[in-house]
Each structure stands twice: as C-alpha cells, then as structure tokens.
Image (tube, rainbow, N blue to C red):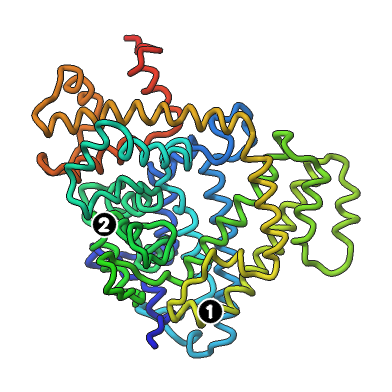
C-alpha cells in the first residue's frame, strides 16, 4: 500500500518560481505567511461576515479576526505535532526534505498557521449564505439557467456547487497576481495543507465521492496537480468517476481542527456578548475542555469580578485543552493519514473530547446562529447577491450572445477593466463574474446593490 512521506509533504518548491531567493531571516513557510497577510484579498476579510453580519458593535469577530485566531491555534497544533513526530521518529529529525536545513517543529507550525490564515480567503459576502446565493442564481434564475445550459456539462458543477474553498485556492494561485503565473507562488507544502477538499467540482456529481465539498475549479486543476505530484499526495483512482481527487495532506486535518476549535469557542463567546447565552451556560459548555491538574483555575476564575473576564479566561483554557486533545488524535491516526485514509468529519469528531465538543456545536446552532440579526442579514444577502449577479452575470452573458442592451453596456463600465478571460469563452467569463461578486466585502456589496437599485445615487 502506498504511503505519503513527511520529507515530501514539507516541500518548499514554489511552482512558477525558477530560483530560490535569499531568505533574509525568514523560512520559506514564513514567507508564505507574509505573502498572504499582506495581500488585498486577506485585508478584505475585515469586512466579511463571520457570524454576526455588519455588526454594530466593534467586539464580535469578522472573518479577519477569525482567520488570525485560527492561524494562532494552527501554529500551536502544528508545532506540538511536529515536536512529537520528531521525538518519535529519529529518521525524520535527520531529514532535510528538499532544503539544506533539517526539518524542525517550527516548520510544521508555520505551514499549518499559514494555511489556516488563508482558509477563509475565498468566502463571498454574507458567509455561507453568499455561497448559497451564488449557487441558487445559477440553478434557478432565468439567466443563470441559460448560462448553465450553454456550458459544457463537465464545467457546470463549478457554478451549480459554487464553493468558497475553491475560490480561495483560485485567489492564492491566480487572482492575487493575475499577470504572473501561479499567483502568490506559495510553497507546495502550504498549498497542500490549505487544500481541505483536494478534488474538483465534478466529484460532487459522483456517487463515489470522498469529500462533502470540493476545493478546485476546473480552471485550477492542473496547477494543483503539479503541487500534489511534488508532495506525493495519493491520487484516488476510481474508474467509475472521471473527476480528479487526491488524499488530503495530513496537515490539512490540523488546519480543519484549528478552524473548528476557533469558531466553536469564539462563537459561543460572541453569543455571550450578544446576550444569546448566559454565563452559566458558557461555564457548563467550556469547563469540560479544561485539562489541568488541581483546581487552581477555579479559584482564579472565582477571583474575577466581571463575567466577560471570566468568559475570556474560560475560552483560553478551553482552547488549550482542545488543542492537546486534537494533537493526541492526530498522532493516534497519523499512520492512516499518511496512507491516505480519509478521517470522516475531521479530528474534532474523533478526539477524546468529542462529546462535549458536539454539545458546544449544538448550542451554537440552536442559540447563537439563530440570532434575529444573523437570520435577517442572511436573508437580505440573498437579495443583494441575486441583484448583483443578475446585473453583471446577465450583462456578460448577453454580450457574449450578441444581445447586449444599453443597460448592459452601462453596467459593464462598472466592471473591472483588468479582465483576462478569452472574449468568447463563456466558462472563463462567468468565473470572472463570480470572482468580481465573491471578492466584494459585505459593505461594498450592499453599497453597489443600493446604487443599482436606485436606493442611493453617487454624488459628484
């Protein structure tokens, strides 16, 4: 049975970059981190929904703060995992991979932190409801259906199952630097670790699919295939399905765990701030995760006067317990992960603290995610996204069809000038429409919607 090797999984090769540049005190993985954090796509996450959209308070989290918190958790997960792997496998500690430096625990931490930093970079406005709105437009609107009918059958899934994860890889590998091959030119290790669902959209139509979502549009399939080959990811061979799929990079499980831990704990904290859950409920939910000797933490908690301070302390302690539980789970399943076995539902569903973690998720779903503001803004998001897609998607489609109206020609003046798709290629043109709309922040989407609807008019 084939198995993946850590010496290849931590490859620093950068597709598209012929020569290694001086490090100047940074490792290759630190450089990846910096490229992401200084990108415009990452900055836009400061105005994209986490749970409470367009929140009036400055406390609750955005996608940006969530990504930073997930990255910090990911660094700890990766570093602790790397430390244990290096301690248990002497041959790994002596391995230099494809560099002249030995593999270190910090390399594991940096790769996971970097991939976690970017894990939401492809999210459209209004979070998951924004993804649903894009899918619904292509599946149900009159113009969207015409687009789907005009596309080759093997390309339709990219739009009917529009996925923020795939949009994220498209941003990293193409859109952030559209005039440069391979975009940000991240290391293969970071690309593989980022890829939560290493398969293309066509896999969603297969009865034999491995993943519940996909991470690649057809346009970026060959680019990721190059990184996958360098990393030695196991390719799934299924004669019953023509779609391309690989086993996950093992470190992708740590990124997934960092995301799960981050949002689950943070959402209940935000829910407390919003008055959706009580302090007693927070204590009952988070105290089972605290794995420390003695009861010093209870005395420390009792000494705090303010409930908000107590919740922040509980949050920190709970994250620590969950991190160690997730690392234990990873080490328990490491051999299977290297062999390409898919761990259904990720580490947090298999770790020792699974039961209280599932209870936390149920509370978030029943109380936090049902906040009236969340539901109202999500509903409004469908209207905003539908209007923008009808306007720009319709204008692009009718222009390609030779039936553009005067309104279409006016709308396209608001469209980005730096379009690179072939003029007669409907697939690439519609990808650019979803690039444009999904790349907006919540505020910019609402502002443009109001202007197109005549609610507000720009003043000269």
Among numbered discs 1 and 2, the one appearing first in the sequence: 2
Q: Is residue 262 left or right of residue 9?
A: right
Which residue is at a point 67% across and 43% down the rendered structure image?
366
Q: Nearer the viewer, residue 109 or 453?
A: 453
Q: Is residue 416 left or right of residue 37?
A: left
Give residue 295's quadrant in the image.
bottom right
For label 2, the residue is 220
Give residue 193's quadrant in the image.
bottom left
Quadrant including the C terminus: top left
Does any portion of residue 20 appear in the rendered image? no
User: Counting other residues with Cα less than 10 Å from the Cα at mark 2, is it few (<14), some (14-19), or many (20 or more)?
Assistant: some
Q: Is residue 303 left or right of residue 436?
A: right
Q: Position of residue 251 (x, y in %)?
A: 48, 69
Q: Is residue 417 left or right of residue 261?
A: left
Which residue is at a point 40% across and 64% down the rendered structure image?
190
For label 1, the residue is 334
Q: Secondary structure at mark 1?
A: helix
């Amino acid at each position: 049975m084939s198995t993946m090797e850590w010496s290849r999984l931590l490859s620093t090769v950068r597709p598209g970059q012929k020569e290694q540049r001086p490090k100047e005190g940074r490792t290759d993985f630190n450089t990846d981190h910096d490229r992401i954090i200084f990108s415009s796509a990452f900055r836009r996450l400061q105005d994209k929904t986490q749970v409470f959209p367009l929140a009036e308070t400055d406390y609750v989290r955005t996608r940006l703060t969530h990504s930073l918190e997930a990255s910090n958790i990911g660094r700890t997960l990766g570093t602790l995992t790397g430390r244990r792997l290096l301690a248990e496998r002497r041959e790994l500690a002596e391995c230099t991979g494809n560099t002249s430096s030995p593999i270190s625990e910090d390399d594991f931490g940096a790769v996971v932190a970097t991939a976690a930093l970017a894990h939401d970079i492809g999210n459209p406005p209004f979070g998951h409801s924004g993804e649903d709105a894009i899918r619904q437009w292509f599946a149900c609107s009159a113009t969207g259906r015409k687009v789907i009918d005009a596309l080759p059958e093997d390309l339709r899934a990219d739009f009917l199952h529009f996925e923020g994860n795939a949009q994220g890889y498209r941003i990293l590998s193409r859109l952030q630097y559209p005039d440069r091959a391979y975009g940000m030119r991240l290391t293969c290790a970071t690309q593989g670790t980022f890829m939560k669902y290493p398969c293309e959209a066509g896999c969603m139509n297969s009865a034999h699919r491995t993943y519940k979502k996909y991470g690649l549009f057809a346009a970026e399939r060959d680019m990721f295939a190059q990184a996958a080959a360098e990393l030695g990811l196991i390719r799934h061979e299924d004669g019953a399905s023509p779609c391309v799929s690989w086993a996950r990079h093992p470190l992708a499980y740590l990124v997934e765990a960092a995301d799960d831990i981050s949002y689950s704990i943070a959402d209940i904290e935000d829910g407390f701030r919003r008055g959706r859950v009580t302090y007693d409920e927070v204590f009952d939910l988070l105290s089972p995760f605290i794995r420390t000797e003695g009861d010093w933490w209870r005395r420390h908690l009792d000494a705090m006067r303010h409930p908000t301070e107590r919740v922040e302390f509980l949050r920190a302690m709970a994250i620590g317990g969950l991190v160690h539980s997730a690392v234990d789970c990873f080490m328990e399943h490491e051999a299977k992960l290297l062999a390409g076995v898919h761990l259904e539902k990720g580490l947090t569903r298999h770790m020792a603290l699974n039961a209280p973690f599932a209870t936390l998720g149920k509370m978030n779903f029943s109380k936090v995610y049902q906040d009236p503001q969340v539901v109202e803004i999500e509903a409004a998001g469908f209207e905003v996204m539908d209007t923008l897609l009808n306007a720009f998607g319709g204008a692009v489609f009718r222009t390609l069809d030779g039936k553009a109206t005067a309104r279409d020609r006016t709308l396209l003046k608001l469209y980005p000038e730096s379009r690179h798709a072939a003029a007669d290629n409907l697939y690439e043109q519609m990808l650019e429409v979803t690039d444009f709309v999904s790349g907006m922040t919540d505020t910019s989407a609402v502002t443009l919607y109001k202007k197109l609807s005549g609610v507000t008019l720009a003043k000269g």
